[in-house]
Image: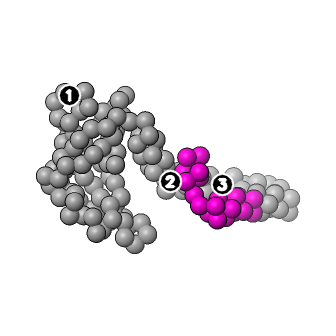
Amino acid sequence: MWELFKSFSLSARVGAIGGMLGGLVGAAVAIAVEPIGGTIFVVVFFAVFLGGMWMGFGPQVRRNRLVARGRPAQATVLSIGETGMTVQGNYGLAKLRLSVEPPDGGDPYEVTVKTLINRFDIPAYQPGARLDVMVDLADHTRVAVV
């Protein structure tokens, strides 16, 4: 999560810190006003909030980690499909079935990955296209498109 926070702009960092401080003050007030009900509310609220944050940012954090620590390889697109999710209006979460050529020279293998693709770049991801990917050395099924 820290890597993601460091990638924020200064204004986004200030906003995130301000939001966290506001949440902590609100939690303290809720507990002070109604100790039992406030505590229950705060615990449930933070569990839902943190779960949502992990569901939203977790995949990107894991992808960034794989890009930083993985090993470069080549892959061929076998198929592309939509997941129905769009981010910032222009980036669709695509499901790619890839044939990965292992970095150690072994036999190619198939994996399915989800990655954000700008809608204008979709022609570059059609079946037969060659992509640069990063492969997790400990688990070759974990692949990130770079």
Question: What amino acid is labelled 1 in the image?
Answer: Gly
| Three-letter amino acid code of the residue under disc 3 | Phe
Asked whether 133 or 93 is in front, the reply is 133
x and y, in percent, of residue 50 in the image: 60, 52
User: Would you say the residues marked 2 and 1 are in contact, meaning their CB atoms lie under 8 Å apart?
Assistant: no
6 within the magenta span: yes
Indicate the amino acid at tag 2. Answer: Phe
Residue 88 higher or lower than 50, as above or below: below
Q: Nearer the viewer, residue 114 or 123?
A: 123
Packing grade of label 2 (10 A; few <14, some 14-19, many >=20) is: few
The x, y position of residue 14, in whole percent, is 68, 62
Rendered residue at 27%/64% (across/down): 121
What's the magenta bit mostly, secondary-structure-wise? helix
Residue farthest toward the left in the current orientation of the protein: 128
**Which region shows up in magenta?**
1-22
Secondary element at image label 2: helix
Q: Is residue 70 left or right of residue 43?
A: left
Residue ID for mark 1: 105
Give the labeled residue for mark 2. Answer: 57
Indicate the secondary structure of the residue bearing disc 3: helix
Marks 2/1: CA distance? 33 Å
- Is disc 3 surrounded by few (<14), some (14 to 19) or many (20+) residues within 10 Å? few
Residue drawn 43% across the image and 36% down it = 69
